[in-house]
Amino acid sequence: MQQFWIDTDTASDDAVALVMALRSPVAQVEGISVVAGNVSLDQCVQNALYTVELCGKDTPVYVGLEKPIMRKLEDASEVHGDDGMGDIGLDLKGRTPATEHAIDVMTECIMSSPGKIRLVTLGPLSNIANALLRTPELAGAVEHCYIMGGAPHMPGNITEVAEFNIWADPEAAHIVAESSMPQTYVGWDASMASAFVTPEQIEEIRAIGTKFSDFAMDIQATILKFMQDFAKMPGFDLPDPLAVAVALDPSIAETKPYSMNVVTGDSLTRGMTVVDFMDVTKKPANVNIVTHIEPADFMKMLKELLG
Ligand code: RIB
Ligand code: CA
């Protein structure tokens, strides 16, 4: 079994990703750390606890940072719903997370099993950056870090040029990208290309007929309307589930090493992931970027893990 640690700003796509990881026969999820992002930290924690309970697991959920490291939280509730889970009336309150701080436990878990823990990040990188600043040797102890983030090939989804997870805490993303930690980015471009779920596929997934397939589609209610109203696109993409699919089976993704910079600060290009695709700078590669995933490979894994 591959050991995992998952960092998440649990909302409608994160929750599907958690179901996939928790139900995968090849994965042992050692812990889930929560970070503020899509919605408030407290709500993300409750959403994660609800999802773990739905899967019948006792995977510990730890509370992390309630805001980006150098700026206020700007959430994505307009995309995921006020509760982050489609505002469909789920009972998303009153569950109790573990008491230790997420960053302490995540660091201890990784450092106590060097080269063993596969880190998957599904939200802003605030927790990860903080952990790396406190324990720089963490970068060399992680087996690999799969990051849902960035828009190497634009457009962005929160601005013209930036993807939400990177944009929400660009300073944290810069720290992570420069950390020498082995890291692979599953960008929003990959998500739109390989994990877009059409109305027909929504019905195919619902036809699986399990509580997991129903849950996975039900909680997309807000994003489904958002995509229709704003993007004029029927359906929705599943970026975090795509990142988990790659982490569960890296062979489904074509990747390539590149030099990548993250734009920090508050300019028009805040959170932009600037990738040197033509190697014009001759700077050494610091990240891997997913360049292709067959949509059918993702959909097959998604359906299997919702079955
Ligand atoms: O841009 C997509 C990412 O932002 C996903 O992780 C989604 O959950 C939101 O956090
Ligand atoms: Ca997320």
Image: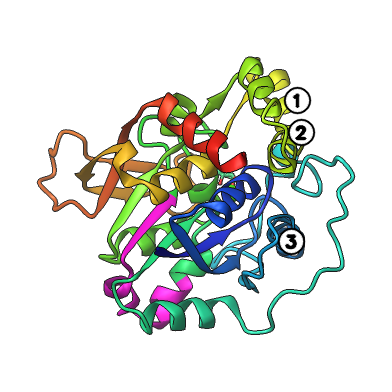
What residue is rendered at 42% in x and 52% in y?
Answer: 147
Query: In this rendering, does residue 155 appear at all?
Result: no
Secondary element at tag 2: helix
Q: Quadrant of the N terminus?
A: bottom left
User: What residue would you read off at disc 3?
Assistant: 53
Q: Considering only order in the chain, which callout, 3 or 2, is on the residue closer to the N terminus?
A: 3
Q: Mark 3 or mark 1: which is in front?
A: 3
Q: Which residues are magenta?
A: 130-147
Q: How far across and how far down the image is residue 6, in percent?
A: 51, 62
Image disc number at residue 225: 1
Residue 149, horizontal then vertical, whole percent: 45, 46
Q: Is residue 15 above or below residue 86?
A: below
Residue 261 in sight here: yes
Residue indicated by mark 2: 222
The image quarter containing residue 233 is: top right
Residue 204: which quarter of the image? top right
Label 3 to label 1, Cα distance in Å? 27 Å
Closer to the camera, 226 or 74? 226
User: Residue 197: which quarter of the image?
Assistant: top right
Q: Is residue 16 above or below residue 177?
A: above
**In screen coordinates, is 238 left or right of 148?**
right
Q: Position of residue 58 (x, y in %)?
A: 66, 70
**Image location of residue 144, percent across then percent down:** 32, 61
Q: Are marks 2 and 1 in contact (CB under 8 Å)?
A: yes
